Structure formats: C-alpha cells, structure tokens
Image (cartoon, grey):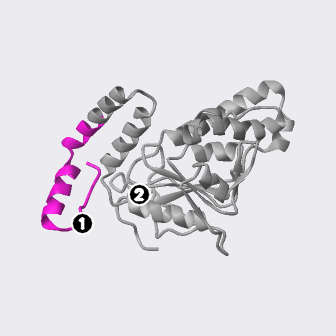
Amino acid sequence: MAAAAPGALGALRVGRARLLASCCTRLGPSAWVRGPAPRRGYSSEVKTDDELRVRHLEEENRGADLKERAKMHSSEVGPFVSKIRAVINDIANLPVPTIAAIDGLALGGGLELALACDIRVAASSAKMGLVETKLAIIPGGGGTQRLPRAIGMSLAKELIFSARVLDGQEAKAVGLISHVLEQNQEGDAAYRKALDLAREFLPQGPVAMRVAKLAINQGMEVDLVTGLAIEEACYAQTISTKDRLEGLLAFKEKRPPRYKGE
C-alpha cells in the first residue's frame, strides 16, 4: 500500500451505513492512522504526531439490537441510551468534515448517527427512518432534534409520527441526503461517492475547514447578527496561520498549496 500524504482520508465504516471523515486532525488517543489508497476494509497503522490522519472504525450500525433491549431491566435502558447519545454527540462534535454513506439500512439509531454527520449520501436502494414510535418509544439519540434541523419541523414530525422508512430517492426528495446513487454490484455506491466528496475536501486548509464547520454549526443555532459575530471570530483564527500565507504564496506561484494545519 502506498503511503498517503498528510491529510489523507479514512473511513468510519459502520456496518452498511458508513461514515467518512476527512481533513487533518487528531480525533483522540491512538487516533493517528496512516491512510492507504482508499478501499474497503483496509487496516490502520499508528504514526507520529506529525502525520495527521483520521480514525478508522468498523462496527455494525443498523440501529439498536432489539433482542438485547428486550432482556434489559427498565433501570438499564436509560443509561444504555445515554451512552448511545454520547457517542452520537461525539461524532457530531468532531472538528473535521464527516460524511455518512448509507448503502443499506440506517434505521433508528443508525439514522441518528448519520444525522450527526455533516453530509449524507445514499444508494437508491438504501432504507432509512426513525422508526421508534412503532416500539412505543421515541428517538433517543438526537433524532427529534437533528431531523427537524435537517428537513424542517413539519416533515420531521410526519416521519417520526408515522415511523416511515424512506428509500434513497425519497430521502433525497425531502432533503435528508445530499446525493443519491444507483447501487452497484459491490454494494458500495454511496461509500464511493463519499470518498469522491472527501477527495474534494482534502486539499483545503485544515484550520480553515475546522473553523468553517464551527462557524456554520454554531451560527445555525443563533440569530443572524450573533451568527455574523461568530463568523468574524472564526475568520480571525485563520489570519495568523502559516497556511494562509502558504495559500497566498501558492496562488502567486501558480502551484498547489502545501498546507500543514499550522
């Protein structure tokens, strides 16, 4: 496998609903990985602090295990859901762009995890929905809050009240996902699209990407005047960076910039 340049991408592969994070950042302990040429099922290798990468995870994510839930005592359910909520919030708070690639099922908690990502893409054959009301409960991993923010309150209520499951085309029509693809023989059409998007993100300045995400996320929760103040504060963080000067120099010299996240 060829070594990747700083800023290489990695996939947060979650069952058949995969998350893909891009740009340069440290995500946590043992989170430095050397990214090979993107492909399914690659391994990760811990590298030095100078080689910023993304975390590669693999885990099933079609929603809660209902058989496991049925065995739980009522006193165990609250703490269990709290842990799920904390994990999803951690994904939402990642400083790098995140893309959810939905090639199969993303029901209940699976969709809540996808909603915590910045961008969602799906195969036309994918199935997604917040189906908790069928089980006489409600979404507990942020679904009641993130779905209305993604598609609007009225439509979010309709989908949650009905526990309706959407395919990729329907999800695109309501604005739940950004791109819908015809599924391929390998079953990874959405994943491949997510990789293409990540490749568009990776050349940009890492600091700029982090503060752009911060400005957007925080600005969406406040009024316009406060949002503009947040943007100004975030912009100020880029002024003194070496990357900004490198960007100007690269433009002058008509060459690709070599950003280091500094």
Q: Nearer the viewer, residue 167 or 255?
A: 167
Secondary structure beneath disc 1? loop
Mark 2 highlights which residue?
47
Q: Nearer the viewer, residue 57 or 22?
A: 22
Mark 1 highlights which residue?
256
Q: Position of residue 246 (x, y in %)?
A: 18, 56
- Relative to 262, residue 69 above or below: above
Q: Does residue 212 show up magenta in the picture?
A: no
In percent of the image, x 70 and y 28: which residue is there?
79
Q: Is residue 98 left or right of residue 171?
A: left
Q: Is residue 69 left or right of residue 121?
A: right
Does any portion of residue 84 appear in the rendered image? no
In percent of the image, x 46 and y 68: which residue is there?
36
Image quarter for residue 15? Answer: bottom right
Does any portion of residue 204 appear in the rendered image? yes
Q: Amino acid at mark 2?
A: Lys
Image quarter for residue 215? Answer: top left
In percent of the image, x 35 and y 43: which residue is there?
212
Instruction: Label the magenta part by its dominant secondary structure.
Output: helix
In percent of the image, x 86 and y 37: which residue is there?
70
Q: Amino acid at mark 1?
A: Pro
Report the span colored magenta: 234-262
The span from disc 1 to disc 2 (Cα, nearest Å) is 25 Å
